[in-house]
Image: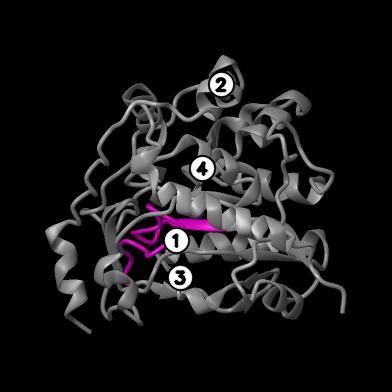
Amino acid sequence: MPGLLLRPPPLDCLTSFALNAAARSRTFPASKHLLRRLSAMNRDLLPATFTPAALLLATWLTAGVTGTALAGPWAEVTAPSTGLTKVIGGVSSGCIAGAQTLPAEGDGYVSIRRYRNRFYGHPDLLRLVSDLARKQARRGPDLVMIGDLSQPRGGLMSSSHRSHQNGLDVDIWFQLAPSAAVANRDTANQADPPSMVTPDGEGLSPLWGDDQQALLKTAAEDPRVERIFVNAAIKRALCASDGDTAWLRKLRPWFGHDAHFHVRLPCPHDSSECTPQAAIPAGDGCGSELDWWFSAEARQPAKKSSTPRPEPTTPAACRPLLSTN
Ligand SMILES: [Zn+2]
C-alpha cells in the first residue's frame, strides 16, 4: 500500500536537535527585546525558555515545536472527568472538566498518534473537527489527519505544546492521507507528515496544493474558529496569491506550523471560568507586519542572557480534576 511522504530519517535527528536546543536555551537565550516582541504576539505558544535558532530550525523540520519542561501530573491522567463539560483557565494554563473523546475515525478524518492520548476536547471542538472533515469528504476520498487536541483533563503536556491545555486547540495536518491504515502506519513512531514550506523557510514546497488551501480556508472561514497559527511563509504566499484576503485575517504567523496548522476556538458559552485570548488585530495581516518573520532578528540567536520566565500557574479550580473521577 502506498505510504505517506514523511520527513526522512536524517531530518528527524535534526528535529531532536531543535528540541534539545530549545531545552538547553539557557546557553543560547533570546534577548529581552525579542521575547517581549514575541510574547506580545502569541505568548502562549512560547516555551518556558526560548531559542530563536532552534525554533527557526523547527520551521522546516518539525511542526509546532514548543518544547516545554515539566508536565506535572496532567500527562498521567488517563481519562476525562465525568460530569458537565467546563473549560477552566486559558489555553496555556488551564484544564477541562468533562471533556469529550474524539473518535479514532470519522467521515473524512483519521485521528493519528492516538498513543499520545491527546484526543480530548470541548464538544464545540469535536463538532468543528467533524464538520471540517465532512467538507473534505465532499472534496475527495482522502482523509484529514487530526493531530493533538488536549489531554483527558487538559493541563500541561510533557512535550510539543505549551497550549492545548483547555480543550479548545487542535492541530490539523496539511497532508491528506489515502486511508486511515496508511496514516496510522506511517505516523506510528512519532514521524511527522512533511513540511509545506521550502527548506529556506521562504516559500511553499511543491507539496502545497488546492487540497491544503481548501482545508485551511474552510477552517479560517468557519465562524466558530477564533484564530489559526500557521507558518509565516504559508501566510505570505496566500497573501500574494489569493485576491480575496479577508479570510486570511485569522491566520496568525508563528514558528513551525509548516506541516500542520493549529486551530483555536474562543471560550465557549458554558464555561464562565475560561480565560479568553486577546482579540486578533483588524485587517488581513498581509502587510509589513509579516516582514519581521523573515528578518535577521527572527532567524538569528541573540547573545544576551536572560532567565527563563516562570510557568503560568494552573488555576486553583483545576486542582480537583486531578483527584476526582
Ligand atoms: Zn497546536
How far is disc 2 from disc 3 in space, using C-alphas? 35 Å
Disc 3 target residue: 118
Disc 1 target residue: 124
Depth check, mark 1 against mark 3: the one in front is 3
Query: Of residues 280 and 78, which is closer to you in this image?
Result: 78
Depth check, mark 3 against mark 4: the one in front is 4
The kind of residue on which mark 4 rests is Ala
The kind of residue on which mark 2 rests is Ala
Quarter of the image where one finds residue 25? top left
Residue at image position (21%, 54%) is: 273
Where is residue 269 drawn, in percent x and y?
A: 31, 54
| Lower sequence index among marks 2 and 4 | 4
In this view, 128 is above or below 74: above
The reply to whether dot 2 and dot 4 touch (C-beta < 8 Å) is no
Q: State the SS at label 2.
A: helix
Query: Of residues 286 and 139, which is closer to you in this image?
Result: 286
Residue 54's label in the rendered image is: 4
| Lower sequence index among marks 1 and 3 | 3
Magenta highlight range:
153-171
Disc 2 target residue: 296
Q: Is residue 156 magenta?
A: yes
